Each structure stands twice: as C-alpha cells, then as structure tokens.
C-alpha cells in the first residue's frame, strides 16, 4: 500500500520502533480514506503473530505514541480492542507493513 506522503516517514519510524515484533501493522481511520485533516490522529493497529504480554504492549504503546505529537498516534493491539473496533479495522483498514513469519 502506498502511504500518504504526510505520514510515510512517521510509519517508517513506527516500524523501526517495533523492531522484532512479528505480524502485521494496520493503518485505520481517516488516513485510510484519504480525507484526513493535517491534525487527524494516525490510527495504527498491531496484529501480532503471538499475544504480547501486557507490560510489553504497554511499553510499545508508550514508545510508539511518543514518536509524534502532531499528528498524534493512536496505537492499539488488535487482540485487546473491542470486537467492533477490531472488525472495523480489519474491514476498512489497510495493511501497511508485514514482518516475515
């Protein structure tokens, strides 16, 4: 998937921050629909191959969300979100990175 130019470098930094995590990274929200305002949050969801322990997820979330104040990053673990949000991300989101398994 070709990323919007405004957030391409930010997504690259997120992928680098996630390091050895395996799975897929999803973009969700207004940025996937091409109608995001410059101040719109960047929704990023991790679909890890294996469940992340809560302390590890909390640390990743803190580090990823600290990468940018504008646009703000909303980082979620697909295993931990409400079922309705998970379904919406899987249906309308876009895979932006996939680590080899």
Image (cartoon, rainbow, N blue to C red):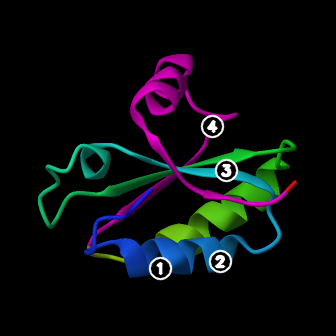
Out of 67 and 99, give the one closest to the viewer.
Answer: 99
Q: Quadrant of residue 78?
A: top right
According to the picture, the residue beneath numbered tag 2 turns out to be 17
Q: Gap in Å between the C-alphas at discs 4 and 1?
A: 20 Å
N-term mark: 4 or 3: 3
How many callouts does the rendering have? Answer: 4
Figure quadrant of the N terminus: bottom left
Q: Gap in Å between the C-alphas at discs 3 and 2?
A: 14 Å
Give SS at disc 1: loop
Q: Is residue 19 left or right of residue 5?
A: right
- Identify the residue shown where x is 54% and y is 27%: 86
Figure quadrant of the C terminus: bottom right
Q: Gap in Å between the C-alphas at discs 1 and 3?
A: 19 Å
Q: Residue 78's mark?
A: 4
**Does residue 8 lie above or below 41 as drawn?**
below
* Residue stretch in magenta: 71-100
Q: Gap in Å between the C-alphas at discs 1 and 2?
A: 9 Å
The label nearer to you, 3 versus 2, is 3
Give x and y (percent) for residue 59: 70, 66
Give x and y (percent) for residue 92: 39, 31
Give x and y (percent) for residue 36: 17, 54
N-term mark: 1 or 3: 3
According to the picture, the residue beneath numbered tag 3 turns out to be 24
Tell me the crowding category of disc 2: few under 14, some 14 to 19, or many 20 or more residues within 10 angstroms, Cα based: some
- Taking the view exactly as shown, the residue that stands out farthest to the front is 1
Residue 82 counted in the magenta span? yes
**Does residue 86 lie above or below 60 as drawn?**
above
Tag 1–tag 2 contact (CB < 8 Å): yes
N-term mark: 3 or 2: 2
């Amino acid at each position: 998937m070709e990323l919007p130019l405004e957030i391409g470098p930010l997504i690259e930094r997120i992928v680098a921050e996630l390091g050895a995590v395996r799975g897929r990274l999803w973009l969700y929200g207004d940025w996937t629909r091409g109608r995001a305002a410059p101040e719109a949050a960047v929704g990023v969801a991790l679909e890890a191959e294996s469940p992340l322990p809560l302390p590890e997820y909390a640390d990743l979330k803190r580090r990823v969300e600290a990468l940018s104040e504008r646009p703000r990053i909303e980082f979620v673990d697909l295993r931990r979100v409400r079922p309705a949000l998970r379904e919406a991300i899987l249906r309308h989101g876009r895979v932006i990175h996939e680590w080899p398994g």
